[in-house]
Image: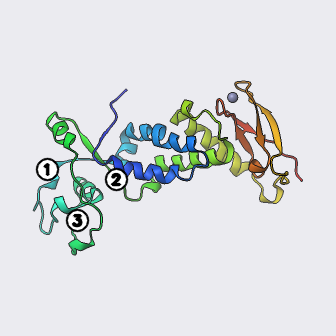
């Protein structure tokens, strides 16, 4: 397996992941985004990598490379990323730069000398990218069909991505707002048995009343529900 990317501004990546994790209904699900999803992003390759990260290139950061180029030492990481993409940026009012200027972490100079490639996470318009759309779909699936006591630490990114996709397809196919199952009293529980691992568990009706699937808290298998119409 390839090495994870050396990222110069991991705090920008963490900030985006926290925005997702903060909407998770269960703390363990939130942790999953900060660990498993983060690891997935740090191992992206090909087009997905190039959509999210920019190769750090000191050559393109030389002050005065073109007329009107702002001093790179005053710029936030997002603008350093633009420069490293070869984009010419101009800042007419230096006071307009509100963010903290980007500072190379101490380890990065050494990494550069060793011939390693540091990368900048591009933190502008993150949510339009394919991998982040997938992460948001996983969040929706977690919040709708996966329970608090699920075995999140065992769930790989690939499996979550696949299952969330399938869940989304089932919702699109089967959800009918005019035929939502009756709301059962608070605390009403139903039983289910996972067809894959045999785990028997209970889930609350009310939380899933408009839901068409639940997931096994042990192995995350998607279990389609057949609510009777009220
Ligand atoms: Zn199971």
Q: Is disc 1 placed on a helix, strand or loop?
A: helix
Q: Which mark is residue 59?
A: 1
Q: 153 or 51, which lies in front?
A: 153
Query: Residue 192's image quarter?
Result: top right
Residue 90 higher or lower than 31, as above or below? below
> What is the C-alpha distance between the residues marked 1 and 2?
19 Å
Q: Which mark is residue 137?
A: none
Q: Earlier in the sequence, mark 1 or mark 2?
A: 1
Q: Position of residue 11 (x, y in %)?
A: 35, 49
Query: Residue 46's image quarter?
Result: top left
Horizontal placement of 214 versus 111: left or right? right
Q: Which mark is residue 122?
A: 2
Residue 162 higher or lower than 24, as above or below? above
Q: Which residue is outermost to the right?
A: 230
Query: Residue 100's image quarter?
Result: bottom left
Q: Which residue is outermost to the left?
A: 64
- Residue shown at 81%/60% (left/top)? 178
Q: Is disc 2 placed on a helix, strand or loop?
A: loop
Q: Is disc 3 placed on a helix, strand or loop?
A: loop
Q: Earlier in the sequence, mark 1 or mark 3?
A: 1
- Residue shown at 52%/35% (left/top)? 158
Q: Which mark is residue 89?
A: 3
Q: Quadrant of ligand 1?
A: top right
Quadrant for the N terminus in the image: top left
Label 3: few (<14), some or many (≥20) within 10 Å?
some
Horizontal placement of 20 versus 94: left or right? right
Residue 133 higher or lower than 70, as above or below? above
> What is the C-alpha distance between the residues marked 2 and 3?
15 Å
């Amino acid at each position: 397996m390839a090495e994870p990317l050396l990222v110069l501004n991991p705090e920008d990546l963490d900030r985006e992941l926290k925005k997702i994790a903060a909407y998770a209904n269960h703390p363990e699900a939130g942790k999953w985004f900060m660990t498993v999803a983060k690891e997935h992003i740090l191992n992206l390759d090909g087009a997905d990598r190039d959509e999210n990260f920019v190769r750090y290139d000191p050559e393109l950061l030389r002050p005065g490379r073109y007329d009107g180029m702002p001093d790179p030492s005053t710029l936030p990481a997002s603008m350093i990323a633009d420069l490293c993409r070869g984009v010419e940026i101009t800042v007419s009012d230096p006071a307009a730069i509100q963010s903290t200027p980007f500072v190379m972490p101490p380890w990065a100079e050494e990494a550069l000398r060793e011939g390693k490639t540091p990368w900048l996470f591009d933190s502008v318009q993150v949510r339009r990218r394919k991998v982040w759309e997938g992460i948001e779909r996983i969040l929706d699936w977690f919040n709708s069909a996966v329970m608090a006591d699920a075995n999140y630490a065992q769930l790989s990114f690939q499996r979550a991505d696949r299952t969330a996709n399938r869940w989304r397809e089932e919702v699109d196919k089967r959800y009918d707002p005019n035929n939502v199952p009756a709301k059962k009293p608070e605390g009403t529980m139903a039983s289910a048995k996972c067809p894959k691992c045999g785990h028997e568990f209970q889930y609350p009706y009310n939380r899933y009343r408009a839901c068409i699937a639940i997931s096994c808290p042990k192995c995350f298998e998607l279990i389609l529900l057949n609510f009777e119409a009220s």
